[in-house]
Amino acid sequence: MTLSKIYKQILTVVILSIATLAVLFYGFTSGNLGWADLALLLALVDAIAGIILIIQYRQHDKLLKQLQIMTENIVHHQPAVPLFVEPDNPLKGVADQLNELQSRQQDEGKSIRNSNAELITILSSLPVGVMVIDSTHDVIFANHKMSVMLGRDILTQVHPYTQDIRNYQLLSLIENVYDSHKSQQEEIQSVGATSVTWDTSVVFNQLENDFHILVIMYDISDIINVKQMQIDFLRNASHELKTPITVISGFTKTLLGGAMDDKKSLVEFLKIIDQQSDQLASLVQDVLTISHIQNGTNYHYKPLALHDFIDAELASYQSMIQGNHVAIHNQVPEHVEVIADTTTLTRILRNLVSNAVKYNRPNGEANITYSDNDSYWQLHVSDTGIGIAQKDISRLFERFYRADDSRTKQKVSGTGLGLSIVKEMVDAVGGTIDVKSQRGVGSTFTVNFPIVKDRDQPNTQTD
């Protein structure tokens, strides 16, 4: 039905009404009842046409209201029900265009929501902390890593950023960006039990009529620690090399200066030179060992009767054991068989046993035990020695690190690389090493070796 049809129907109803009145008037005036019957028939037709007109008008008005509601929903980005209009309706084109507009808006909205969800997922999985603060100093987004760095749960609702940030240095950096409207970068130190350094960028983002502040934080503690370890390594290596070289050079010059004529001094000085030469050779060998491990090596695994293997290794330490008056007990069950690389296991065992003897008390004990689970088998080396302070355990496997910083007080000889070599070897074969210790009570080193299923194929470990 078209508007022109409605108008024609209105005109038809009016004409029928006039015709009915005219026929009815003529019938009454002429006294002819036939004209009266015709008038009644015309009146009935007129009534039916009027009812049809009213129904069609209401349908047209309902469609207009539906179009209005649909338009308002589109304007306010609300979902709207599609309209289906008869082909001959003049509003058919408008309804189809609104349906198309609604469909495109829904597609664009879905695309935007998907893009936002992907962006939030990416930001949430980043290894850096991200926080977005609006111009009113309210947090509008923060990822999980930022919560971990700040050590508190960040609400998803809009709230002041001072509710989450307590670090004065970071607060000052953000306020400076708000004041200057310029991006800034700075290394922020955390305040807490563990020292953490964040490389922090506060980015000023100018929008069309507003601005946002983007805070990006990256934990660079490991990088700083590596740099410090490199500095410590060079310093300690220089010291360790300098000491035997200085002793060898000094005593050699003393001998060349005439001390060689004294046979007693000659023998004594040569023993010292030989001792320091061995120390220097051990240091160089340990450094080469670490370099060899890091450059990659081949590991050939084979079955070992662990109890017998340990007994054979302990036999070479009898002189040291007796000299230090330490009793070592091999408590590994005789039936235990493991699959391991003998070279790696030998070096690890010798370092741990050597430390258990050298750092033990007189008449002390050391025990070697075994355990296993579904994924690892464990070798435990415990002693009743001097123990290690808790503050030193975290740095125990650093190269050249000693719990006692005073080298003049050092009573135990060594290069300071033994435990770092053990750690490198254990890491290289995919294992882990743990330490439990108490000063004056003793220490227990536990090495977790991964269980190797294939006995025949050697494993190549490279970095």
Image (spheres, rainbow, N blue to C red):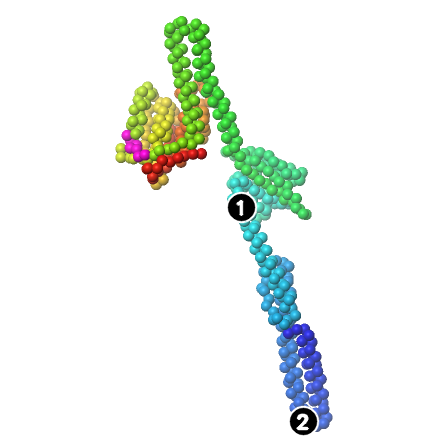
Residue at the spot 37% in from the left edge and 25% down from the top edge: 355
The image position of residue 456, as x and y in percent, is 33, 37
The residue closer to the viewer here, 49 or 28, is: 49
Figure check: 460 above or below 256: below
User: Left or right: where does residue 76 sit relative to residue 257?
Assistant: right
**Is residue 382 in view?**
no
Figure check: 320 above or below 342: above
Q: Residues within 10 Å of mark 1 (few under 14, many from 20)?
A: few
Q: Which residues are magenta?
A: 302-308
Q: Which residue is mark 1?
A: 122
- Secondary element at image label 1: helix
* Residue type at the position of mark 2: Leu
**Is residue 269 in view?**
yes
Q: Please give the label number shown on residue 288.
A: none
The image position of residue 289, as x and y in percent, is 41, 26
Q: Which residue is mark 2?
A: 33
